[in-house]
Amino acid sequence: MKFKFTTIGLVISFITLLYSNLSQAASLEDIKKQFFDYDAAVEFWQTHKSRAEMAKEWSRVSSTYRIWRNYYDVNRERAIELIAFDPSASIIRKGHDIYLLNVYWRKGYKAFDPSTSWNQVNNENVCKKMKRQNVFTHSCIDYPDWRSPIELEKDNAKLLVHN
């Protein structure tokens, strides 16, 4: 029997698996283990503040990472073992970590209150939610602004309504 994998099907499966794994992380140590280089991920979070900066780096690594990711989705342990022999290992590792950065960013962004300016969180409950997702600096006011043009437009419209 042949299996036909669609790109969208693999992406949905991966995101579902990733979110379930992330939600089970019990401690910062568990979260750090999800990254190949957690310290570099923290630095990326702190230095790549715009979507353009993040997207530039993602475009450099994404195609190589996505090929490896197909193996990872099928057999995680084996895919990690194979990286040691892959000439593109550093690109794959960087791609994996950027992807996870974006997953955590997106979870924090979902808690963002667009009635305030970016990184000007005034609501204590919103700040707590955003801090919980910011496993890099544990702050609600230093999120990189990786919003898409559509997200930015929607947030700005909501901001105008509330001001």
Image: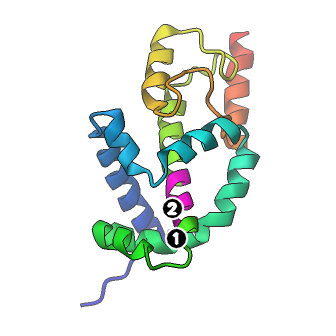
Q: Secondary structure at mark 1?
A: helix
Q: Residue at x 49, y 51 (%)?
A: 37
| Quarter assignment of residue 80 | bottom left
Where does the image place residue 163, in percent across and percent down from the top left?
A: 73, 9
The answer to whether residue 64 is left or right of residue 8 is right
Q: Which residues are magenta?
A: 92-98
Circle 2 sits in a helix, a strand or a loop, which is it? helix
Asked if the residue under mark 2 is in contact with the one under mark 1, i.e. CB atoms within 8 Å, the reply is: yes
Reply yes or no: does residue 34 show up in magenta. no
Q: Is residue 49 above or below residue 100?
A: above
Residue 89: assigned label: 1
Q: CA distance from mark 1 to mark 2?
A: 6 Å
| Closest to the observer, 126 or 43 | 43
Q: Which residue is mark 2?
A: 93
135 with respect to 61 (left or right): left
Q: Residue at x 64, y 58 (%)?
A: 58
Please identify the quadrant where the N terminus is shown: bottom left
* Residue 117 visible in the picture: yes
In the image, 153 versus 105, the foreground residue is 105
Image coords of residue 92 (percent x, y):
53, 66
